[in-house]
Image (cartoon, coloured by chain):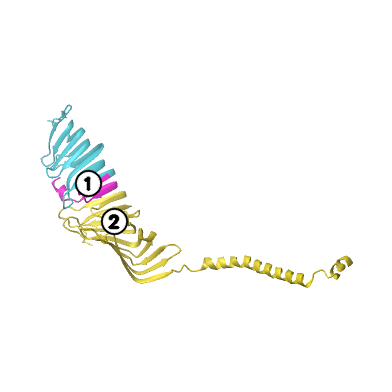
Amino acid sequence: MSAYFGYFDRPFWSGRQLMLAILFAIIGAIAWWQLKTPDEDAGAHRTRPRLPDYVVDRFSAVETNDSGRPIRHLKAIELRHYATENVSELDQPRLELYQIKGPSWHAKADRGTIYADGDQIRLEGNVELNRAGDDENRPAHFETERLDIWRKQGLAETDLEVRVNSDGDVLTANGMRLWYNEPTRTTFHGRARIRLAPESDPEQDPSP
Amino acid sequence: LKDDAKQPILIEADDVEVRESDSTSVYVGNVQVDQGSMQLLADHVTVYHREDRQPKFIIALGKPARYKQRLDGDQGEVHAFAKRIEYNADKDELVLIGDGVLIQGEDRLTSERIIYDRARAQFRAGGSGRVKITITPEEQ
């Protein structure tokens, strides 16, 4: 024990050394606290609500091609942009897809999401896609639950059930790809069923 | 049956393509076309549409493609088989091409090419290869 006691008798630490020791102890404590608290921060981060960096009320935007011709017009009750994900969410989106000649396509849905700066727009919930008829083409009315609009390809596609009504002719399928720029081309997949109404059809579905 | 043309046309297929550029629709995979008593079964069907979207010309391909329809009165049914069946709506004429077989009631006709007039339930056969007709006399 005395050795041990002797151990403390000699002026073991000078004043300066003592100050350094205390300083290191404080730094160590701070470092330990820093190391520990991030867990709590991360916890806080995880539960932090997903907040948009900006919100646009009654959003409306017209997009033009390289020569300045309008190609589509997107409207929504509200747009919410999320910078970290680079997506924008839409409420009640309405999308008009202009044609060089002939009537536009009009799409609407409950919700929408804009990806990749607009190269893809996903419409979800009670999705409808309509085109009026003209002297060359019959009116067309599409219904599905989800539709992806791809700008570059001029393509509207879904892999969900789709129903098409056109002048009383009806088609149902389990997937569709519609190249909507004139002249349109459409492929349907997964057991497609078509009913072509006879010229005078008592069952003709009323136009949409 | 005469009334068949007034019935809706029901088409089913695994895959469908509709082209507005040339008013055609193409049906691929287990294709079944029904209109009243008429039925067409094939692997691949191309339909050329009129402006009112009614079929103007149909080409059915199969191994073989199969066609059947009930005839008016008590004439029974007509059955047709061929690798390629063409239907011309304006002429109301069916053309069987490649291993064509036409069976009407008890009578049977085989030929490489058979033209069947649906309105008059009459047929003409020819083309390369032999025509073989089997007419079953009615029992006395």
Residue A9 placement: quadrant = bottom right
From this view, report whether residue B84 is shown above or below residue A44: above
Q: Nearer the viewer, mark 1 or mark 2?
A: 2
| Circle on res. B34 | 1
What is the chain letter for disc 1?
A: B
Percent coordinates x, y for residue B38 in the rendering:
19, 44
Amino acid on which disc 2 is placed: Arg
> So how many labels did they put on this image?
2
What is the chain letter for disc 2?
A: A
Magenta residues, as a range? Answer: B1-27
Query: Split into 4 quadrants, where in the image is the N terminus of chain B?
Result: top left
The foreground one among B67 and A189 is A189
Residue extending farthest to the left is: B120
Residue at 57 percent across and 68 percent down: it is A41
Report if residue A47 is visible in the image: yes
Percent coordinates x, y for residue A82 in the rendering:
43, 65
Amino acid on which disc 1 is placed: Asp
Q: Which chain is cyan?
A: B
Residue extending farthest to the top is: B130
The foreground one among A56 and B9 is A56
| Circle on res. A163 | 2
* Label 1 and label 2 in one chain: no
Query: Split into 4 quadrants, where in the image is the C terminus of chain B?
Result: top left
Residue A131 placement: quadrant = bottom left
